[in-house]
Amino acid sequence: MITYREQYWLSIADLREGRSQSREDRVALYRARSEVTRAIDRLALATADPALRTPASAAVWSAIELADIPLGPVTDGRFADEVEAALAERRERSRNAHTVLRNAATVYIQQLSRGARRD
C-alpha cells in the first residue's frame, strides 16, 4: 500500500512538473497496486478477525481510490483548485487510514503474543 501511494504521488509530482506519464511509470503503479491486492489476500488467509481486516480494507481502498480523482490539466504546476483540494483530502484520509491500520495491527500482534486470539 505504501509503495502504491508512493508511485501515485510521484506520478502527480511528474504531472505538476509538466512530465507525461511513461509506460514504465504506469507499469510501476499497476505493479504496486497488484502488490496491495496480494497483501490484502495474504491477510485474508491469515485471519478472519474484523478488528484487523476492517481497517486493512479501509486503508487499501483509501489508497486505491486516489486514482479515482479526475485530474484535468495542470497550469503553472497546479491542478484546478477543486482537484488540489481533493488530492489533499484524500492524501490525509489515506494517511489516517494507514495509521489506524498500523495501530490495529499493533494491538492484534500484542494480543497474539499473549495468546489472546485464536482464529
Image (cartoon, rainbow, N blue to C red):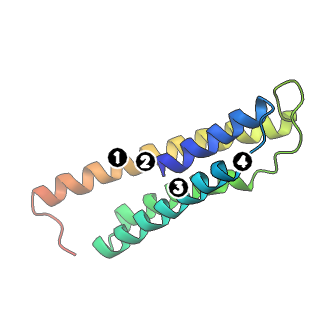
Residue type marked 3: Ala
Could you tell me the amino acid type at mark 2?
Answer: Val
Q: Mark 3 vs mark 4: give the one in front.
A: 4
Disc 1 and disc 2 in contact, CB within 8 angstroms: yes
Instruction: Find the distance from the CA under tag 2 to the CA under tag 4.
Output: 33 Å
The quarter of the picture where residue 116 lies is bottom left
Residue at the location (85% across, 33% down)? 81
Which of the 4 image quarters holds residue 115?
bottom left
Q: Is residue 74 left or right of residue 97?
A: right
Choose mark 3 or mark 2, whichever is in front: 3
- Residue at 17 percent across and 72 percent down: it is 118
Q: Which numbered disc, 3 or 2, marks the residue that appears first in the sequence? A: 3
Query: Residue 22, labelled with which disc?
Result: 4
How far apart are labels 3 and 2 at the CA level? Answer: 21 Å
Position of residue 43 measured from the top left corner of the image (x, y, whole percent): 35, 67
| Secondary element at image label 4 | loop
The x, y position of residue 45, in whole percent, is 32, 75
**Mark 1 surroundings within 10 Å by alpha-carbon count, few (fewer than 14), some (14 through 19), many (20 or more):** some
Q: Earlier in the sequence, mark 1 or mark 3?
A: 3
Q: Amino acid at mark 4?
A: Ser
**Callout 1: SS:** helix
Q: Which residue is mark 1?
A: 103
Cα separation between marks 4 and 1: 36 Å
Helix or strand or loop: what does disc 2 sit on?
A: helix
Q: Which mark is residue 43?
A: none
Q: Which residue is mark 3?
A: 32
**Residue 61 shown left or right of residue 77 in the figure:** left
Residue that mark 2 sits on: 100
Q: Residues within 10 Å of mark 3 (few under 14, many from 20)?
A: many
Identified by mark 1, the residue type is: Asn
